[in-house]
Amino acid sequence: MVLDTKYRIDKQEIIDDFNMEGEVLREALDKIARINQLLGGNRLTLSGVKKLISNMSDVSEITIVDVGCGNGDMLRILADYGSRNNFKFNLIGIDANNFTINHAADLSRQYSNISYRCVNIFDKVFEELKCDIVLCTLTLHHFKDKEILKLMAVFYNKANLGIVINDLHRSSIAYRLFQMLCFIFKLNAISREDGLTSILRGFKKQELFYFSKKNNFEKYSIQWKWAFRYQWIISKI
């Protein structure tokens, strides 16, 4: 059967239910993090952060907000990187699901510079949060185009240095490959169904250019990376 990926689909994912909780959700969050790590997704986000802070030498502390932080794996990787390279990071994970936040906090207990907040990013409290860098890893595709335009404007206004987006390339090949991964990793129903939906809610490169132009971003780069990801970096410096 031919898979049409010309347009983003408008289908909510199971994990988008902010009231969802329990062992099934915990397993899904950890499996997603594990697959992202194996496919190089964490390295992609980390390299974006490195680019934004590469010319910094006189900043005492860098505040990084991770939107849709999942189980917090990206923040822990950043904390370890900062510790090894003498960066003082203040790391904040944001998610609208309280169970997810509690799970991430439990996994991050040994990291004193990581904190978590259960916040809906469309609420005013999020707009008032200030930081140096906003991260959004495998989260932006959960929103509709109009919401993305609004969110990117909010991210840009709150970030002193810039934004790092790491998200999916909408592709029939990526879809078929993920079906194979579902079998290999024995993903549960949530991870399997949401993963396939995520790919069909992912992006084509021209769509990311469109979002950039509509928000009048002047300094940005959009690069395709393995495995079927786009790294979208918006710099304010």
Image (spheres, rainbow, N blue to C red):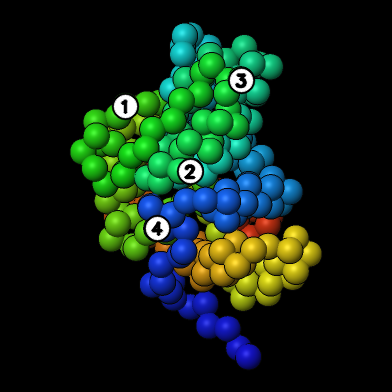
Identify the amino acid type marked 3.
Gln
Residue 100 badge: 2
Q: CA distance from mark 3 to mark 4?
A: 29 Å
Name the one closer to the observer, 88 or 233: 88
Mark 3 or 1, nearer chain start: 3
Name the image quarter holding the C terminus: top left
Residue at the far right in the pictured view: 184
Residue 130 badge: 1
Q: Are marks 2 and 1 in contact (CB under 8 Å)?
A: no
Q: CA distance from mark 3 to mark 2?
A: 18 Å
Residue at the far front in the pictured view: 22
Q: Are marks 1 and 4 in contact (CB under 8 Å)?
A: no
Task: State the residue at coordinates (52%, 69%).
Answer: 197
Mark 3 or 2, nearer chain start: 2
Graded by Cα atoms within 10 Å as few (under 14), some (14 to 19) or many (20 or more), the crowding at tag 2 reads many
Which tag is nearer the camera, tag 1 or tag 4?
4
Identify the amino acid type marked 2.
Thr
Residue at the far bottom in the pictured view: 1
Q: CA distance from mark 4 to mark 2?
A: 11 Å
Question: Where, by quadrant of the figure, is residue 111 drawn?
Answer: top right
Question: Where, by quadrant of the figure, is residue 177 drawn?
Answer: bottom right
Mark 1 or 4, nearer chain start: 4
Quickly name the residue at label 4. Answer: 17
Task: State the residue at coordinates (41%, 37%).
Answer: 94
Identify the amino acid type marked 4.
Asp
The reply to whether residue 71 is visible in this rendering is: yes
Residue 110 badge: 3
Could you tell me residue 88's position as x and y percent? Answer: 53, 14
